[in-house]
């Protein structure tokens, strides 16, 4: 027995020496694509990645920042070529398109239940397709109503419209007394669909097989837009231009109200202090006939199915989106975190030196806490959106009645959704 112990000790010494002298295993590389964060946020992002690498010595990260306008094209090309990054910043609708193709990984095998529950439920729900998660929520935004008090006062309007039903009477008063437009109705992106939800309720039936807005409520929404254009209550250019034009016309004093995020206030404060002093901030418009919850826009971090290291990829995504790092991000930019714990920080409750910014922040936080993503990830979203937009434009121009336009959109949606007779996709 003594001899055996002596031999074991003797053999252990060279093994220990060998372990101490052996070179460290090479780190695995993870590739991260973000959307238009460089160069203004280089220091922040690089600090995040250094911290991740210090906490996780198995991995190192190569960061690539992609311009906003190029992200979808680059992601599709990389997925097709099998060269997709390990982690990529996407919006839920485009991510859902990839999830429909089976190109994104489900995070649940790699993310603990505690981590999953750390995100706001509406933000987590926005990253599901057919019930399966496809990404981790990152930062959020929500639109407010900005109004020019001076213009409204000259029209005899004592308050900013709170409801979609109030918009047309207010627009008529503005047109008749000042000759100006009340609002620019953006038709780009998901804005018309979001308005449909706010005024008429969910876009899809419970089984997801048909448009829920077919019928009187959807027709009323199309007719509401038709009246705005027919009575020249909105600029005619609204038919072909979008949110960027709405922002420009509000900043130039050509429209009295704007639906946009709180981040625009910082831009106005610097570019047009006189206008900034006249702004009043109110919540999103609602309707007694639609969904009363405020709409939320969410961005996420997704892991392509082609990633050779999904464990490391989700560790990186979870690190970037944890409560501390989300809070650090939203202290730099006027956005909101998807982490519930981050919203409890004093930065969201302290009054601050600028009363307008403080009110906008408080309203935005309240909307995010109780809101939802009005346009959830849907099959063939791009085609559904285009069909809805074409029908809406046709009704606005009087080429079809609202009833006929809604019926045609509903028929197109049913065909696109592709359910069988038993209501299954």
Image (cartoon, grey):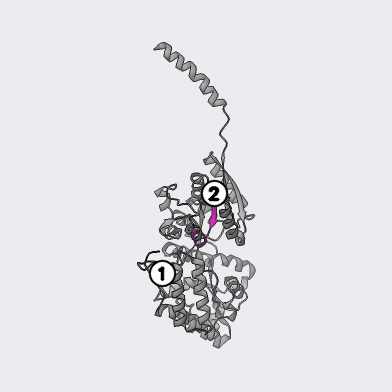
Question: In the rendered image, which residue does mark 1 sit on?
Answer: 204
**Helix, strand or loop status at disc 1:** loop
Q: State the image quarter where residue 29 is shown.
A: top right
- Disc 2 or 1, which lies upstream in sequence? 2
Q: Is residue 66 left or right of residue 220?
A: right
Residue located at (56% from left, 48% from top)? 48
- Other residues around mark 2 within 10 Å, as few (<14) / some (14–19) / many (≥20): many
The total of numbered circles placed on residues is: 2
Is residue 291 shown to the viewer in this render?
no
Residue shown at 52% from the left, 45% from the top: 308
Decide: few, some or many residues near mark 1? Use Cα within 10 Å; few <14, some 14-19, many ≥20. Answer: many
In the image, residue 79 above or below residue 394: above
* Residue 340 picture location, percent across and down: 44, 56
Looking at the rendering, which quadrant does residue 37 occupy?
bottom right
**Residue 16: where, in percent of width, then height?**
51, 23
- Magenta span: 85-96
- For the C terminus, give its image quadrant: bottom left
- Residue 251 in view here: yes
Q: Which residue is tagged 2?
A: 86
Q: Nearer the viewer, residue 80 or 356?
A: 80
Q: Residue furthest front?
A: 421
Observer-nearest residue: 169 or 407? Answer: 407
Residue 180 lies in quadrant: bottom right
Residue ID at (46%, 14%): 7
Q: Is residue 418 magenta?
A: no
Residue 109 on image: x %, y %: 42, 47
**How much space separates mark 2 and mark 1, taking CA atoms?**
33 Å
């Amino acid at each position: 027995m003594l001899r055996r112990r002596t031999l074991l000790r003797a053999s252990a010494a060279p093994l220990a020496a060998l372990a101490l002298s052996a070179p460290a295993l090479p780190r695995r590389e993870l590739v991260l694509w973000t959307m238009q964060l460089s160069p203004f946020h280089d220091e922040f992002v690089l600090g995040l990645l250094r911290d991740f690498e210090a906490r996780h010595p198995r991995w190192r990260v190569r960061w690539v920042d992609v311009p906003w306008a190029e992200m979808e094209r680059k992601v599709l090309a990389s997925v097709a070529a099998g060269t997709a990054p390990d982690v990529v910043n996407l919006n839920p609708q485009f991510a859902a398109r990839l999830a429909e193709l089976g190109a994104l990984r489900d995070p649940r095998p790699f993310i603990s239940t505690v981590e999953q529950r750390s995100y706001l439920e509406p933000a987590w729900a926005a990253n599901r397709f057919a019930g399966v998660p496809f990404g981790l929520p990152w930062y959020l935004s929500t639109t407010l109503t900005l109004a020019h008090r001076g213009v409204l006062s000259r029209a005899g309007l004592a308050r900013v419209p709170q409801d979609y039903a109030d918009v047309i009477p207010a627009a008529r008063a503005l047109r008749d007394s000042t000759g100006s437009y009340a609002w620019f109705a953006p038709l780009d992106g998901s804005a018309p669909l979001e308005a449909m939800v706010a005024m008429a309720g969910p876009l899809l039936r419970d089984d997801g097989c048909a448009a829920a807005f077919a019928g009187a409520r959807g027709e009323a929404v199309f007719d509401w837009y038709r009246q705005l254009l027919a009575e020249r209550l909105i600029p005619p250019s609204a038919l072909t231009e979008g949110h960027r034009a709405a922002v420009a016309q509000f900043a130039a004093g050509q429209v009295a109200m704007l639906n946009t995020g709180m981040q625009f206030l910082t831009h106005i404060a610097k570019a047009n202090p006189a206008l900034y002093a006249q702004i009043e901030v109110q919540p999103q418009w609602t309707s007694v006939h639609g969904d009363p919850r405020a709409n939320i826009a969410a961005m996420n971090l997704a892991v392509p199915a082609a990633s050779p290291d999904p464990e490391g990829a989700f560790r990186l995504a979870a690190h970037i989106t944890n409560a501390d790092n989300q809070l650090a991000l939203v202290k730099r930019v006027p956005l909101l975190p998807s982490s519930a714990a981050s919203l409890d920080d004093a930065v969201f409750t302290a009054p601050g030196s600028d009363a307008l910014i403080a009110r906008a922040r408080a309203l935005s936080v309240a909307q995010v806490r109780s809101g939802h993503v009005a346009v959830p990830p849907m099959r063939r979203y791009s085609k559904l959106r285009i069909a809805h937009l074409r029908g809406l434009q046709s009704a606005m121009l009087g080429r079809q009645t609202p009833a006929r336009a809604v019926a045609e959109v509903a028929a197109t949606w049913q065909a696109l959704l592709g359910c069988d007779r038993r209501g299954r996709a």
